[in-house]
Image (cartoon, grey):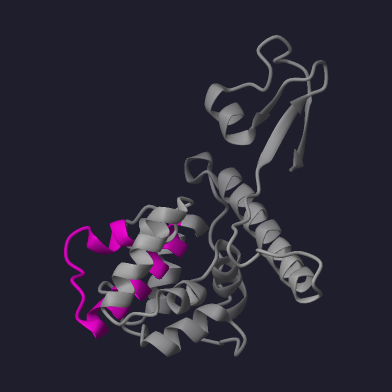
Amino acid sequence: MPTDPGCKVDAAVKRYGLESADPMYESIDEGLLARWRGLDDRTPMGYRPLTEWFNKRLLKQVYDEYGRDSLGARVDSDYEALRSDDELIREEMVESLSADGIDAERVLEDMVSYGTMRNHLQECLEGDKEPQTAETEWERESIEVAREVAREKAERALSSLETKGQIDGVESSSIEVQIQLRCESCPTRIPLEVAVEQGYVCEKHNQAPATSHRS
């Protein structure tokens, strides 16, 4: 399969020896495509769960290399701690990994984003799949990709501003991108996830069109 020398997924596969890290398929790329498309009677995986699956395989490979226990749900729970928005939980996990000789910051840096996974599947592997139905929730996947792209662009811009001395503390902070829906008939404004869960934007004007924006 064609590869992009600048692709972060390819770089991670090479750096961590992940070529045969998928227990169900001959290569990890074959597994990524099969899981994404829903082959072999599998439920198609969206970019978010597929990205998490890949990052957890990367983390497990690191654990195996350094002799850290990776049985049961250990990798899953440690991954969630590493990606936690709670700074204390994240720092405790970083310290735990450091005690085993693992450079947690480097591992986190090498993990991939949803947007990177999408590009790898569609561009590097030239993958495609049948049009998605409602059951695959492609709408939510598209929103997550848009949110991730916005976050990555903000990170690059803030890093540049920090280099220029125009802002401090970027490295010790995290970026959150929230998509909100605003009722055009009143000041009501709610997160997109809440609107989807309850089925409307504004209880009083639930038939009114809504506009969306990021903040």
From the viewer's side, name the closer residue of 69 and 26.
69
Residue at 25%, 74% (x, y): give it: 23
From the viewer's side, name the closer residue of 60 and 123.
60
From the viewer's side, name the closer residue of 201 and 137.
201
Residue 59 shown in magenta: yes
Residue 121 higher or lower than 39, as above or below: below
Residue 169 is left or right of residue 205, and the answer is left
Q: Quadrant of residue 16?
A: bottom left
Q: Quadrant of the C terminus?
A: top right
Residue at 46%, 82% (x, y): give it: 12
Judge whether residue 44 can be spotted in this image. no
Most frequent secondary structure within the magenta stretch? helix
Residue at 66%, 64% (x, y): give it: 170
Residue 97: horizontal and vertical position, in percent? Answer: 31, 72
Residue at 74%, 70% (x, y): give it: 162
Residue 193 higher or lower than 114, as above or below: above
Judge whether residue 172 can be spotted in this image. yes
Residue at the limit of the structure toward the top, as seen here: 204
Residue 194 is left or right of residue 33, and the answer is right
Residue range in magenta is 49-78
Residue 44: horizontal and vertical position, in percent? Answer: 43, 55
Residue 124 shown in magenta: no
Residue 166 is left or right of residue 126, and the answer is right
Residue 7: horizontal and vertical position, in percent? Answer: 59, 82
